[in-house]
Amino acid sequence: ETGVTQSPTHLIKTRGQQVTLRCSSQSGHNTVSWYQQALGQGPQFIFQYYREEENGRGNFPPRFSGLQFPNYSSELNVNALELDDSALYLCASSLVDQETQYFGPGTRLLVL
Amino acid sequence: DQQVKQNSPSLSVQEGRISILNCDYTNSMFDYFLWYKKYPAEGPTFLISISSIKDKNEDGRFTVFLNKSAKHLSLHIVPSQPGDSAVYFCAAPIYGQNFVFGPGTRLSVLP
């Protein structure tokens, strides 16, 4: 059974650029959630995708957007990057009726 | 507004002793809580959970206690082992399956 994988592991961008982060969910999981973890803080919920549609969103601006594909993999897109977007971005997968989420190792984004 | 609080950023414990990690919450609507453990360069991994209909849940060396009237929960690890050294997050579901996390407590178990 393959766990949750994320790519890339590290990324450096400059302010104003756009970034796409990728996530492959654990085998059989149909729900993907994205979290942002700033340094010294706990993960903060960005949004969740189920059956290719957004299924809940946290307090993040519209420049954070996502996609889920038929194979349940997912992308997180961030436009007009700001310095405060520097963080670890975590993807988690689960079954829609299951409360436990399984996290990937994260993508560390640095915005200069 | 931080709905889940972990007021101790770090904790050091001697191997073999008990580790107690604390978590407080403000939202009385929370009815389920989870603890996640995170090692460096890895994602958080689920450790143990508790429903609000219980006041204790045990899994091997790990026990979580819930005090609903005080809006407080704690994770006990006994005996503590060096491999338990990690950051521990307390979390509660919000927006359905998704969670609000506390800021974490870094546990160091000293040999």
Image (cartoon, coloured by chain):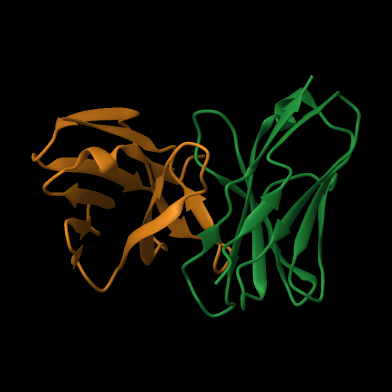
Chain colours: A green, B orange
Q: Is residue B103 above or below residue B57?
A: above
Q: Nearer the viewer, residue B96 or A30?
A: A30
Tell me the quarter of the picture where residue B30 sits: bottom left
* Residue furthest to the front: A1
Q: Is residue A69 above or below residue A19?
A: below
Pinpoint residue A48: horizontal percent, then vertical percent: 68, 63
Q: Nearer the viewer, residue B32 or B77?
A: B77
Pinpoint residue A5: horizontal percent, then vertical percent: 64, 56
Q: Is residue B79 above or below residue B67?
A: above
Pinpoint residue A16: horizontal percent, then vertical percent: 91, 28
Q: Is residue B57 left or right of residue A47?
A: left
Name the residue rendered at 58%, 45% in the picture.
A44
Do we see residue B101 in this rendering? yes
Can you say which quadrant of the picture contains the C terminus of chain B?
top left
Do we see residue B27 in this rendering? no
Pinpoint residue B12: horizontal percent, then vertical percent: 21, 28
